[in-house]
Image (tube, rainbow, N blue to C red):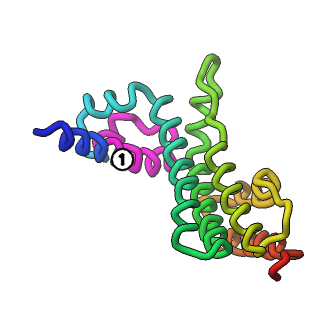
Amino acid sequence: MKDSSRRSDAQRNRERILEVALAELSRCPDVPLSAIAREACVGQGTFYRNFPNREALVLEVYRHEMGQVADSAARLLDTRPPEQALRAWMDRLSEFAMAKAGLADAIRQVTGAPGGPAKPAHTPVTDAAALLLRANEEAGTIRPGITADDFLLAIAGLWQLDPREDWRPRATRLLDLVMDGLRRGAPGG
């Protein structure tokens, strides 16, 4: 097997583990790692080569999801007008918030232990929000002067929604309300 083929297999295994881990840890923070490996169709050796312990797995699932949300901002700006890109990204962020809510117990277990690792910072998501806000401000579609911190504080209600309920309609209403507020006083509006 060629090195590039081996690397792509390893990457696919890692992605599959992360996908399964997100779903399983969201359902049950104490799910056995062996169950995640089995569900991801990888052997124990492959699993532990990627994630030597529960802490490494939980934190990487969190970082991975946060990175996907952050990376989607630039892709959305490449394919949509700034205002549509921002609103679509807000929907993606709400999905992240619900996934994070499901992971919250697992993250607390890992980061709350004495001597445990720190919870990753929100920097990639904050940077993505700043990118989208800047593009919208330059396009005149939102009021000037909104910072990423202001924006994240305004949408903090997402983290109050219960992921076990039908959260999408409430998230849509909340995010539409935030968009209306961002548009108020926009030079182009």
Residue hosting label 1: 15
Q: Measuring from the top left, give residue 132's x and y in whole percent.
A: 67, 62
Image quarter in which the C terminus is found: bottom right
Q: Quadrant of residue 87?
A: bottom right
Q: Measuring from the top left, give residue 135's x and y in whole percent.
A: 69, 65
The magenta-colored residue range is 14-39
Residue type for callout 1: Glu
Query: What residue occupies the far front of the structure in this picture?
Result: 138
Q: What SS does tag 1 mark? A: helix
Query: What residue occupies the far left of the structure in this picture?
Result: 1
Q: Is residue 161 at least partly visible in the picture? A: yes
Q: Is residue 167 at least partly visible in the picture? A: no
Q: Measuring from the top left, give residue 133's x and y in whole percent.
A: 73, 62
Q: Is residue 148 above or below residue 176?
A: above
Q: Measuring from the top left, give residue 49's x and y in whole percent.
A: 31, 28
Q: How many marks?
A: 1
